[in-house]
Image: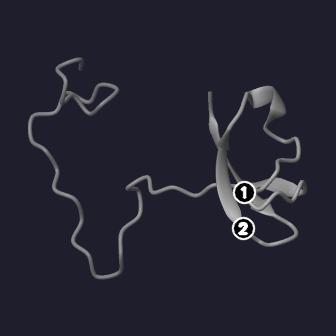
Amino acid sequence: MPLYEYRCRSCDTVFEERRPMAASNEPATCPQGHPDARRVLSVFMTGATRSPGASPAPVMAGGGGGCCGGSCGCG
């Protein structure tokens, strides 16, 4: 079951809740009992960005270029 992030409109509390995809946009009840929390867009780190001044990630030699860059030997 997916994990969704919600923000309460009454107390501004942000919390997570596991629920079926079909119920993801339905209002949720926050931990303080307010029934008017709405789903928010969750942000997570993908590793695709880097900090200013940071060195680029090292390139692995000998990769085959498959779905994972060849590190598993698929490409």
- Read off the residue under disc 2: 13
Query: In the rendered structure, are the residues bearing label 2 and label 1 in contact, judged by CB atoms less than 8 Å apart?
Result: yes
Image vertical order of residue 26 relative to residue 38, above or below:
above
Which of the pair 4/74 is nearer the observer? 4
* Side (left or right) of 28 relative to 52: right
Work out which quarter of the rendered image holds the N terminus and state it. Answer: top right
- Read off the residue under disc 1: 31
Residue sitting at 9 percent across and 41 percent down? 61
Residue 41 in the image, given as x and y percentages of width and height:
70, 55
Q: Secondary structure beneath disc 2?
A: loop
Mark 2: few, some, or many residues within 10 Å (few <14, many ≥20)? Answer: some
Residue sitting at 64 percent across and 50 percent down? 16
Residue 12 in the image, given as x and y percentages of width and height:
77, 72
Q: CA distance from mark 2 to mark 1?
A: 8 Å
Between circles 2 and 1, the one closer to the viewer is 1
* Side (left or right) of 32 relative to 46: right
Q: Give the amino acid at mark 1.
A: Pro
* Quarter of the image where one finds residue 14: bottom right
Q: Give the amino acid at mark 2.
A: Thr
